[in-house]
Image (tube, grey):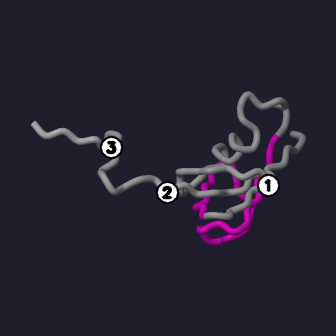
Amino acid sequence: MPTSDTHQPEGHPQGHHHEEITIIVNGEQKIESRSELTFVEVLDLAFPPPRPAPEKDYSITFKGAASIPHDGSLNLRAKVEIRGGTRFDVTPTIKS
């Protein structure tokens, strides 16, 4: 029985892999394999849970996204398609 030295993870056919995308979150480089990110996913990259101040809300702005518009604000139920160099600024705000 022939054997193979290459191992492909289940669900990932040979030759198909997730592209690594370098993005910037609050000035820090992050490597991402997902092509789209939600508000919560970006928030987790900026401030991993548990968050130090649960009484705060957060605002997220982005620049250079693959999706249109390329620049804007990300709301809680939205997602954005990223590309290399997409920048996110995540800012805590006080709940009113």
For this rendering, which residue is in front, 75 or 90? 90
Q: Residue at x 79, y 50 (%)?
A: 90
For this rendering, which residue is in front, 3 or 15? 3
Q: From the image, tell me which residue sits under label 1.
A: 89
Q: Residue at x 84, y 48 (%)?
A: 91
Q: CA distance from mark 1 to mark 2?
A: 23 Å
Residue 82 is one of the magenta-drawn residues: yes
Residue 60 is one of the magenta-drawn residues: yes
Which badge, 3 or 2, is on the more N-terminal residue?
3
Q: CA distance from mark 3 to mark 2?
A: 15 Å
Please provide percent x and percent y for residue 56: 84, 37
Q: Residues within 10 Å of mark 2 (few under 14, many from 20)?
A: few
Locate residue 72: give its quadrant: bottom right
The magenta stretch is 57-83
Q: Secondary structure at mark 1?
A: strand
Three-letter code, disc 1: Asp
Q: Residue at x 30, y 52 (%)?
A: 14
Q: From the image, tell me which residue sits under label 2.
A: 19
Three-letter code, disc 2: Glu
Q: From the image, tell me which residue sits under label 3.
A: 8
Q: Secondary structure at mark 3?
A: loop
Instruction: Name the quadrant of the C terminus.
Output: top right
Please provide percent x and percent y for residue 61: 77, 59
Instruction: Name the quadrant of the N terminus.
Output: top left
